[in-house]
Amino acid sequence: MGWWHFRHDWVSMYTSDEWVGFGSENPLPLDSGGSLSPVELAYETHGQLSPQGDNAILICHALTGNAHVASTPGTPPGWWEHMVGPGKAIDTTRFFVVCSNVIGGCAGSTGPSSLNPQLGVPYGIQFPVITIGDMVRAQHALLDVLGIPEWQAVIGGSMGGMQALEWACMYPDQVKAVIAIACTAKLSPQALAFDSVGRHAILSDPHWNNGFYYGLDVQPHDGLAIARMIGHITYLSDEAMRLKFGRNLQQRTDYGYDFNTEFQVESYLLYQGDKFVNRFDANSYLYLTKAVNYFDLEKKYGSLEGAFEASSARFLVVSIDSDWLYPPHQSKELTSTLMKLNKQVSYATLASPYGHDAFLMDTPALTQLVGAFLCQ
Amino acid sequence: MGWWHFRHDWVSMYTSDEWVGFGSENPLPLDSGGSLSPVELAYETHGQLSPQGDNAILICHALTGNAHVASTPGTPPGWWEHMVGPGKAIDTTRFFVVCSNVIGGCAGSTGPSSLNPQLGVPYGIQFPVITIGDMVRAQHALLDVLGIPEWQAVIGGSMGGMQALEWACMYPDQVKAVIAIACTAKLSPQALAFDSVGRHAILSDPHWNNGFYYGLDVQPHDGLAIARMIGHITYLSDEAMRLKFGRNLQQRTDYGYDFNTEFQVESYLLYQGDKFVNRFDANSYLYLTKAVNYFDLEKKYGSLEGAFEASSARFLVVSIDSDWLYPPHQSKELTSTLMKLNKQVSYATLASPYGHDAFLMDTPALTQLVGAFLCQ
């Protein structure tokens, strides 16, 4: 596998921090024209691979996710705990489930906070700009490493759904099914705009220091928190915010006539921003939003039809009715294209007031859809 | 009038910078319980007041507006140039039109950048937190100054619409008609959230310097620009952005794989942010968004019915179908309440793809609605 590391964390079947493959040849080619080497991929597996290798599912995480999709004994709950496990919709007594941290991220796989081998310091913004296609090309190495000929399904929501779609386009013979939730073949300009302002907040934070803040006393926490706060508003719907916060004040009954935090919704956003900066790298936020913004299957393949033409997968496309960041009309357009191509495709609009975030929530209708589709 | 200044700019009927009334008694009482003194109001008038004083209209501006609602010979176009003037919907050959800069603003009226008379330096955040009610109470002084017994109409969009509604509630016998466009009786939590993040961007800009940046070399331009960029996204609709920018790149045909501005929508937002910091004061942005966030007629008057019960005005309520910041359902709720109270009320949802900003644009349907309502 050349100059690659595979780091296997939180997994019961191997010891932690197992490394698979390394060397100096065979770097990862990138859509930008450059390449990345070494590449380290942190991943988890759940369940047992069948002797024929015909029960493997790849789960792709969203913007700020990681490989820890579900718990194993002694580990904390995963980000899709209700969806993945023994007897659950993605049943680990039946399927061998793999989830890896994307490259560009900051949860074990190679990203801007990794050491730049040429300089011996973290990459910072010397890290190459990567795409969803690059993430998928990196994940593809896991097939060989794990001895899997093809995925029975590639599943993801939001940025994870983009990866699932890209898998079907890039490796049309190695993906038997795709589940793309709260997803799109290309972001709307409004969604681009929100990401752009978030990046601008990081880039204009003086502590961002041109991307070289690793190991320094001060970090670009203000910029990253602002980016996260903007993101959070877009992940929730107007209705979800009404249900959750309304115009309630935080621990007070009347206005304070000052600039302290007063409304519950303000307090919630500040909390989310503060919490986020302790677990996420500002440069990774730049790189991953850029990858999401660049994702455009029409542009890459000439047309949406051209993107999926060769795919032999069946598809489940799910949108959320209150999701204004990845609105249902985008998923419907994708579904229409797949139908025109005579692909086997199921589509559902999930009724939920919780906006884009609903794909991460324990929503019985979504769990049932995923479970039923995998049982087909 | 006590400790008040009235500054009359850009007006043909008086010389510029005319001052009306001053002194040290009679400060402006504020909803916070405090008071403001001195108070300076910058205002414009257009047309001639009738001998009976029965043709006066007040136009209230939105968040970042000013008193310059329309041009007079030798002045630049006003912010509602297509709506206000001889023979236009708000016809200055018939009406005497008044428009004043709100207190808390930065276009002539007293605000955080004004001199704090007790310290001899600009107020900064020593300026009291003001409300939409306080803005209206300040504007009320213009009636006496100009010899106007009552307004034939108070008209405004967005924050200007809030003032128009508050006029009808606070001075029920002095407002004969209200035109409230793209407005609400209280912001949704989603809109509160966007304003809150914008304020947070200013407050966390190190150059904000706890509000005391006047006269310093560096200003909190980064924070203010981010706030403006967030605002701009919310003023446009998803559809408007698709029509205006799509996913087009700015002066390039392919991705640059760097963190420079690439998409046209990014370039537009950066430009809007940069332009804004040269004409607006960051502290005023804090104060005015706070006033907008505090605006809640239900909370202030116990109920929406209670707020409008005493009003003798007739109402025109107009929402914009693509306005997701001040969504039509809020205007409909307001209209329903007014109808329950047996007020004379007309309601229209304007069809426009341009979102909240449509109220400022030259939209013939809106101009006709306003003109027809004023002719009744």
Image (cartoon, coloured by chain):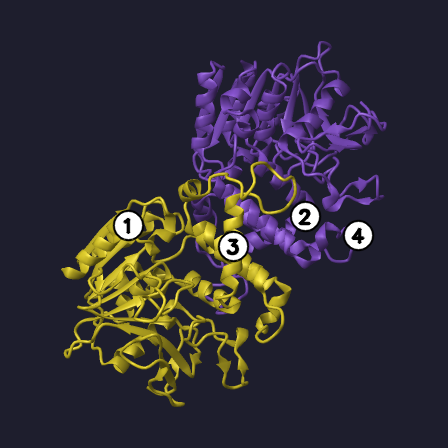
Chain colours: A yellow, B purple
Is any part of residue B9 visible from this angle?
no
Numbered tag placed on residue B215 in the rendering: 4
State which chain disc 4 sits on: B
For the residues labelled 4 and 1, say whether their Cβ atoms are less than 8 Å apart.
Answer: no
Image quadrant in which you'd find residue A226 = bottom right
Per the model, the C-alpha gap separating discs 3 and 4 is 34 Å
For the residues labelled 1 and 3, say whether their Cβ atoms are less than 8 Å apart.
Answer: no
Numbered tag placed on residue A332 in the rendering: 1
- Disc 2 target residue: B282
State which chain disc 1 sits on: A
Q: Residues within 10 Å of mark 4 (few under 14, many from 20)?
A: few
Under mark 4, the amino acid is Gly
Residue at the image position 63 percent from the left and 40 percent from the top: A256
- Disc 3 target residue: A271
Residue at the image position 16 percent from the left and 76 percent from the top: A50
Q: Residues within 10 Å of mark 3 (few under 14, many from 20)?
A: few
Residue at the image position 26 percent from the left and 52 percent from the top: A366
Under mark 2, the amino acid is Ala
Per the model, the C-alpha gap separating discs 1 and 3 is 35 Å
Q: Residues within 10 Å of mark 1 (few under 14, many from 20)?
A: some
**Which of the two residues, A311 or A152, is positioned nearer the viewer here?**
A152
For the residues labelled 3 and 4, say whether their Cβ atoms are less than 8 Å apart.
Answer: no
Q: Please provide percent x and percent y for residue B34.
A: 72, 33
